[in-house]
Image (cartoon, rainbow, N blue to C red):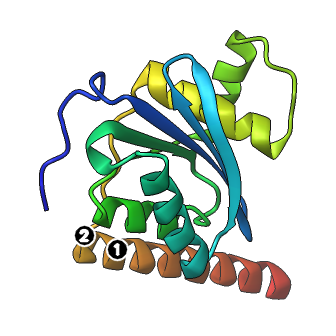
Amino acid sequence: MDEAPSSSSNLAFSLGIDVGKTALELALRNGEETVAKTTVANDSGGHDELLRWLLGQGCGPEETRVCMEASGDFEKAIAQRLYEEDYRVSIVNPRRIKGYASSQLQRTKTDAADASLIARFGQREEPRPWEPASASESRLQELTRARQALQKEKTRTLWSIG
């Protein structure tokens, strides 16, 4: 896979994705305006549709950055798919987006407005690119979660018999 550009300031388009459990709300910016919006399913068919839509808008990986909020792992599959297609993907802490919305005095709270805001955030703030975890990192995360679950269960058991 090709290396992502070190600076994204040369990227003409910014795609903001408001990630939901079942749907992805998309807003595409070119410069200072939102030029296209749509909604696709958050499943493999919707991911295919998103890629076709992007290419139909003239937004290939070389000129497009993608930004989305971390949303309880609902973003992982689409982030992985876009990464595999060589798009520059950023997954941002929702608190950063919320702070950015406050700084922009944005009060509208709809999925479409959020997607536009995320696109603007990605364009102006240029968050660092996301890369998927390696197999060993993923395994370590799984083991860590399992250990935490066991510790919780142990504590619950001790409190119930204590």
Disc assigned to residue 134: 2
Q: Using the rendered view, name the quadrant where residue 34 is placed.
A: top right
Q: What residue type is labelled 2?
A: Ser
Q: Is residue 122 left or right of residue 150?
A: left
Q: Is mark 2 on a helix, strand or loop?
A: loop
As drawn, the label of residue 91 is none
Q: In the figure, is residue 136 to the left or right of 122?
A: left
Residue that badge 1 annotates:
138
Q: How crowded is mark 2: few (under 14 residues within 10 Å), some or many (20 or more)?
A: few
From this view, report whether residue 60 is shown above or below residue 138: above
Q: Where is residue 74 in the image (x, y as percent from the top left)?
A: 62, 66
Instruction: Say which amino acid is labelled 1.
Output: Ser
Q: Residue at x 61, y 32 (%)?
A: 35
Secondary-structure class at tag 1: helix
Where residue 156 sits: x, y (%)? 75, 80
User: Which of 32 and 143 lies nearest the eye of the viewer?
Assistant: 32
Would you identify the image quadrant in which residue 82 lies? bottom left
